[in-house]
Amino acid sequence: ATAELVGSPDLHIKSGSTLRLVCKLHQSTEAPVYVFWYHEEKMINYDKERGVSVHGDKSSSSLVIAEAQKSDSGNYSCVPSNAKPASINVHVLNGELWVL
């Protein structure tokens, strides 16, 4: 089984907006016992001070950070108990326009 983060490898959002990451589980025969979310090396599932909330069901898990700030930029990983992890690079921009 594998995990996939929707929008990877890079996601650009505006500072102050809601960061929503969706981790989809593929080829999983059963729901994971847990899905851990990491920002860089730190697990953030229960980081209420940062406004983090996690919701999940048997086929996906979503991480929501209300009012994302520049400090929320970086690498995020979802690590299900029964699947290969997935990661995404999040860039929180202070209103700059990026032409890709």
Image (cartoon, grey):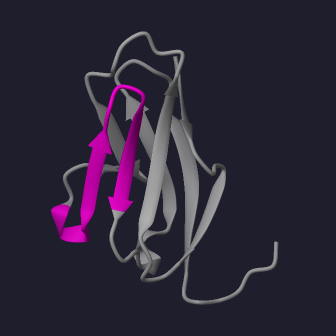
Q: Is residue 78 above or below residue 2?
A: below
From this view, report whether residue 28 is shown above or below residue 53: above
Name the residue located 26 percent from the left edge and 49 percent from the top edge. Answer: 45
> Does 84 lie within the magenta span?
no
Question: Who is closer to the viewer here, 78 or 40?
Answer: 78
Q: Residue furthest bottom?
A: 95
54 to 68, vertically: above or below: above
Of residue 40 and residue 81, the one placed in the foreground of this image is 81
Number of numbered discs on residues: 0
Residue 87 image-quadrant placement:
top right
Residue 58 percent location from the top left of the image: 35, 25
Q: Is residue 50 located in the magenta-colored stretch of the structure?
A: yes
Q: Residue at x 66, y 50 (%)?
A: 9
Hey, which quadrant is residue 55 in on the image?
top left
Q: Is residue 18 left or right of residue 49?
A: right
Give the percent coordinates (x, y) of residue 31.
33, 20
Q: Residue at (71%, 86%) from the top-left corner?
A: 97
Q: From which residue to which does the magenta span run?
A: 48-64
| The C terminus, quarter of image | bottom right
The residue drawn where x is 55% and y is 62% is 90
Residue 72: percent from left, percent from top? 42, 69
